[in-house]
Image (spheres, helix red, strand yellow):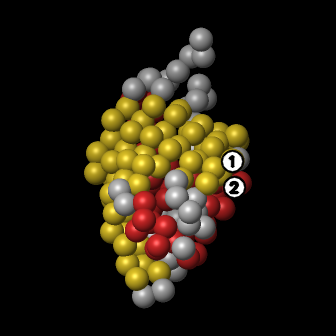
Amino acid sequence: MTPRGSAVANRQAVEKLYTAIEQQDAAAAAACLAEDVVVHIGGHSTLAGDHKGREAVIALGMTAIAKSEGTFNTTVIDMLSNDGYVVVHQRWTAERAGHSIDMTNFIVYRIDSSGRIAERWEYLGDLDAHDAFWE
């Protein structure tokens, strides 16, 4: 069995990621991610799919920031953690090409034994609106 971190340490790992995202600090965000991290996003937009590897995940974030001309913003509503996973209920907003979006999602993070984010699943509040916004 692979040793896991504590619920508190796992929560802190995800909190560091959200701080890095808020500050749009790609280097700090990358430090929170395992090298072989995988992010899963449903739908058919340009952001959808399985994004594998630290560089691909950082590129995904930079794409969202660029497409929203820096308006992409997330706010944590609530966070639950245990010794292997963290679940975040979040609100995110952005503007793009004269359109705005305001949505809540659930995000599930799997934390590896080194305390880094190894996997992320996004459960979108409105998949059709997400696809339409990001095209």
Task: Report the disc number at residue 56.
Answer: 2
Q: Is mark 1 on a helix, strand or loop?
A: strand
Indicate the quadrant containing the C terminus: top left, top right, bottom left or bottom right.
bottom right
At 70% across and 40% down in the image, what residue appears?
36
Number of other residues with Cα within 10 Å of mark 1, as a class: few under 14, some 14 to 19, many 20 or more: some
Q: Position of residue 24 (x, y in %)?
A: 52, 65
Say whether residue 78 is left or right of residue 73: left
Disc 1 marks which residue? 52
Number of other residues with Cα within 10 Å of mark 2, as a class: few under 14, some 14 to 19, many 20 or more: some
Residue 118 in the image: above or below residue 1: below
- Tag 1: residue type? Lys
Counting labels gives 2
**Nearest the eye: 43 or 122:** 43
At 64% across and 42% down in the image, what residue appears?
37
Residue furthest left as drawn:
77
Q: Do the residues labelled 2 and 1 touch (CB within 8 Å)?
A: yes
Q: Can residue 70 be seen in this view?
A: no
Q: Position of residue 34 (x, y in %)?
A: 65, 39
Residue 42 in the image: above or below residue 96: above
